[in-house]
Amino acid sequence: MPCGSNCMTCQNFNPSSCLTCYSGAFLTSNNTCISCASSCITCLSSNPNTCTSCPSGYILDTSTGSCSQITDNSGCSQNCISCTASTTTNPTCTLCLGGYALIGGSCLQCPSGCAVCTLVSNTSSTPTCSLCVIGYFFQVGSSCQPCPSMCSTCLNSTICTSCVPGYFLNTALTCQVECVYPCATCSPTNPTSCLSCVGGYNYNTSALQNCQAALTCN
């Protein structure tokens, strides 16, 4: 039997008795889930119309508990997707776009190739990377370096974990150009020079690409 309205989980013997609520609702002392105002992510249990957090792209006015959409004239810092304000304070950023670090209420761009970064010291003005974007690897020293050119993802400058289209990951964990038919395997530097052949072909160094069609008896 499904749980009651807005319940994420409930008691097995009483589906109307909520244990946890979905986002945008709060749990009451009667174990029911009451929805916040539609513009809220979370709200006061004493007043569902008073927001305590807003969706991305909105400003939380802490003096009124309301959420309003961020516009060019809102006063939020550039590259900010969530901020707070009141009747007596200017908007302060609380969440930045991906690739930016929240520092002192402003959004500072992460170093190249970095998806997530933070400022680990008040004496430093350069964010430290903690997660790299796809196509980069994390290097000791908290920086992101690009993978080898044919790698889609990698562990370091020599070990690939996946390859760009047209290449495959070989046993040496490097990306090699895909072999040309009828090669099953081929030279790392020449995709038409077969080292072994697909079924129906025999390996023959005198044949084109080193593979010769197998003879069949009628």
Image: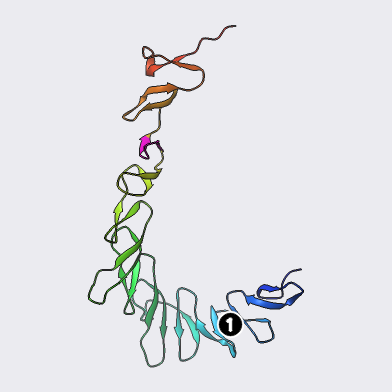
User: In the image, what residue occupies the spot 58% across and 77% down?
Assistant: 24
Q: Nearer the viewer, residue 107 or 168?
A: 168
Which part of the image, by quadrant, shows the C terminus? top right
Q: Percent position (x, y) of residue 99?
A: 35, 64
User: In the image, what residue occupies the spot 22% across and 76% down?
Assistant: 123
Q: Is residue 213 above or below residue 99?
A: above
Q: Percent position (x, y) of residue 34?
A: 64, 82
Which part of the image, by quadrant, shows the N terminus? bottom right
Q: With 199 as the anchor, is 33 left or right in this view?
A: right
- Determine which quarter of the picture holds residue 128: bottom left
Res. 40 in view:
no
The colour mode here is rainbow
Q: Residues within 10 Å of mark 1 (few under 14, many from 20)?
A: some
Q: Residue furthest bottom?
A: 88
Q: Nearer the viewer, residue 156 or 163?
A: 156
User: In the image, what residue occupies the spot 77% across and 74% down?
Assistant: 13
Marks counted in the figure total 1
Q: What stretch of residues is rendered in magenta?
A: 168-176
Res. 92 in view:
yes
The kind of residue on which mark 1 rests is: Ala
Q: Element at badge 1?
A: loop
Q: Magenta stretch containing residue 197, yes or no?
A: no
Q: Nearer the viewer, residue 175 or 23?
A: 175
- Determine which quarter of the picture holds residue 204: top left
| Residue highlighted by disc 1 | 37
Q: Magenta stretch containing residue 171, yes or no?
A: yes
Q: Is residue 174 above or below residue 18?
A: above
Q: Percent position (x, y) of residue 111?
A: 28, 62
